[in-house]
Image: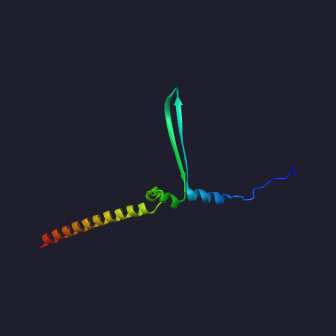
Amino acid sequence: MAGQMTHALEATNLADILERVLDKGIVIAGDIQIMLADVELLTIKIRLMIASVDKAKEMGINWWEADSYLSTKPRQIQAEKEAAKLSRKIAMLETQILKSAEKKSGKAN
């Protein structure tokens, strides 16, 4: 029996662990300070949160929704603003063209 290996009766696989972590969320925090002769030269604060999107939203965290690299919503809003701006410019140009044409037709008469 000395050469036998014992195995856990209930093996937890990686998927189960990941599901539990994402469901509950986990926060890892730490600070790195670089000092020379009791003078602080640099402080790096590290904050890492791992959670599911639903859990993050439940905690009030949704920064990715406003990030143009991660969401189409900001790009869509920006595109709508640019389209409205272009529409105003087109309307202004059309008005100028009409006024110019009216002036030319008035001079011709």
Instruction: Note whether 86 is above or below 39 in the view shown.
Output: below
Q: Is residue 7 left or right of residue 41?
A: right
Q: Provide residue 23's location: percent of width, then percent of height.
A: 57, 59
Q: Provide residue 4's location: percent of width, then percent of height.
A: 84, 53
Q: Is residue 12 left or right of residue 67?
A: right
- Which one is in front, 78 or 6? 6
Which quarter of the figure has residue 76? bottom left
Viewport quadrant of the C terminus: bottom left
- Inspect this view and state whether residue 69 appears: no
Q: Residue at x 50, y 35 (%)?
A: 42
Q: Looking at this rendering, what residue extends furthest in the right direction?
A: 1
Q: Residue at x 35, y 65 (%)?
A: 83
- Which one is in front, 34 or 77? 34
Q: Looking at this rendering, what residue extends furthest in the bottom direction?
A: 109
- Inspect this view and state whether residue 105 appears: yes
Q: Residue at x 45, y 63 (%)?
A: 72
How many marks are shown on the rendered structure? 0
Q: Provide residue 17's location: percent of width, then percent of height.
A: 64, 57
Instruction: Note whether 103 is above or below 60 in the view shown.
Output: below
- Which one is in front, 38 or 19? 19
Q: Provide residue 70's location: percent of width, then percent of height.
A: 48, 59
